[in-house]
Image (cartoon, helix red, strand yellow):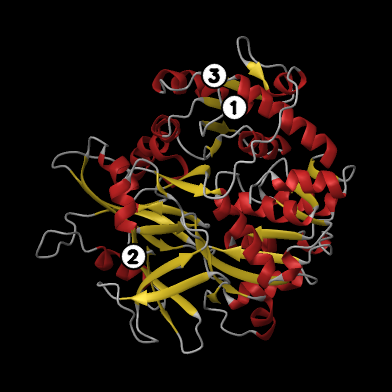
Amino acid sequence: MHLTHIVHRALQLAPDEPVTAYGDRFRTAREQADRVSRLAGALRERGVGSGEHVGMLALGSDRYIEFFLAVAWANGVFHPVNPAWSTREMIYALAESRTEILFIDDAFLDRLEEIRAACPDLREVVHVGDGPPPAGMAGFEELIAGTGPVEDARRGGEDPACVVYTSGTTGRAKGVVVSHAGLVHQALILPARVPCHGVPGGRILITSNFSSISMMVTWLIQGMWGGITVVPRSTDVDGLLDAIERHGVTHAPFAPGTMQQIVDRPDIAERDLSSMRSIAYGAAPITEALLTRVMKVFPNAAFHQWYGMNEFGLATLLPPEDHAAGRKLRSAGRPAIGAEVRIADETGAEVPRGEVGEILVRTGAMMLGYLSKPEETARTVRDGWLHTGDGGYMDEDGYLYIVDRIKDVINVDGWNVYSTEVEQAVASHPAVAAVAVIGVPDDKPGEKVHAVIVLKHGRTASAEDIRRHCEPLIAWKTPTGYEFVDALPLSNTGKVLKRELRKPHWAGRDRQVN
């Protein structure tokens, strides 16, 4: 199956019904099909036609969805660039992926000169916005208006659909290559187990930026069933609540941290959120207290939790019936349809139920591999099993519990931050002799990035000095907490004992992840 199938199906079944909403702008299936085929024609004229990488550096809009479809229609591979990244991180991903055409909106034009200078494969830039494009740059709407439609290449199956970058364990980001079949598999699994999360005529909400697989799948679920994908003009809490009320949103995925912000709003009882029928959440378990509050705010919604990664999609699911019964709420659920989960020891052998080991996963949505990183791919996927780096156990009923992280991964409101990447940024400060970065509990679901620093002899630096140094390098992943010590605790082999650094922050908690 191929992603562009949803365009053909919508055009056949309901050509004049809207398929996207962005603010007050609606696009019907007929309009979307015409625009996508014309934009694909423009891409073909620019040499896209055999798997070339086409990037998008922009905030969310209905044009982002048209970009996904047009690149696939033209037989290309789309590369959504994380808008929360620093310019240096963006350049690394664009250069490594050898992205040849970049779509960019007004929010990032001030970075373009630096990006162009550092990315030799980048041969054309397209402006995405409502206003006229800058001089010397093609415009999104101009390409559509000035190009005739072309036939769909129907790129699909195991062909690469996209490259999505995730943080790297060695300080470098990794491009996860995902096939069309993998994306389609992900979009089918959740509604297969939770029918209320995929219904004809539904209105599903995009709640984060399009650089994650989860938001692509969110759009794809509704595209398959028929209905409207609602893209808010802002994904802050105000923007999300306004979109729910304005468009009568029926389905949405939320990070638990966002749910916390929603229920903490003093005016939340005055908002009309009665249209919501299904809420998915993931990346961090929800507390029973928060779940109780959220269910009161969304009284008509069924809740379900998922555990997954860009590398393999959805692995486990805690369905609405378990939430309604208050059953196993601390778990991440049981293996989803099409997924296998194993708790293994260091050799990869399965451990007894109740015993903690590494979580291994294989699904029908396994990545094709890490772009240009065969050795990293081979280390991560062994004998068909993807080694997640998460520690957990499975109970006698087959429910998965995540208790620790084997890799140094920090969960910040649903986004993975690898400590080595942050440590490299902190260590590049001239006053820093050594640093260890850990995750510490946050008041909301998820964790905070915390740096434990040893300064060079005779040098001084404040927390604010380190923060200002790191922000241009790693943006939102910059530590929020700082601790200065005389020395880091080391093992006999000289390895930093991060567990010792974490102990005082996690004392009294039965779980070592938040």
Which is nearer the eye, 464 or 42?
42
Of the residues shown, which amino acid type is indicated by label 1?
Answer: Ile
Q: Residue furthest bottom?
A: 396
Along the horizontal axis of the image, is 13 left or right of 413? right
Mark 3 vs mark 1: in front: 3
Picture residue at 75% right of the left edge, 49% below the top: 229
Which is nearer the eye, 2 or 437?
2
Task: Provide the residue designation for mark 3.
Answer: 124
Task: Provide the residue designation for mark 2.
Answer: 383
> Mark 3 or mark 1: which comes first in sequence?
1
Q: Look at the picture and state if 120 lies above or below 157.
A: above
Picture residue at 49% right of the left edge, 44% below the top: 164
Of the residues shown, which amino acid type is indicated by label 3?
Answer: Glu
Where is residue 490 shown, x and y percent of the image?
15, 61
Q: Which mark is residue 104?
A: 1
Disc 2 to disc 1, C-alpha distance: 40 Å
Give the image quarter of residue 513.
bottom left
Mark 2 vs mark 1: in front: 2
Of the residues shown, which amino acid type is indicated by label 2?
Answer: Asp
Give the image quarter of residue 138.
top right
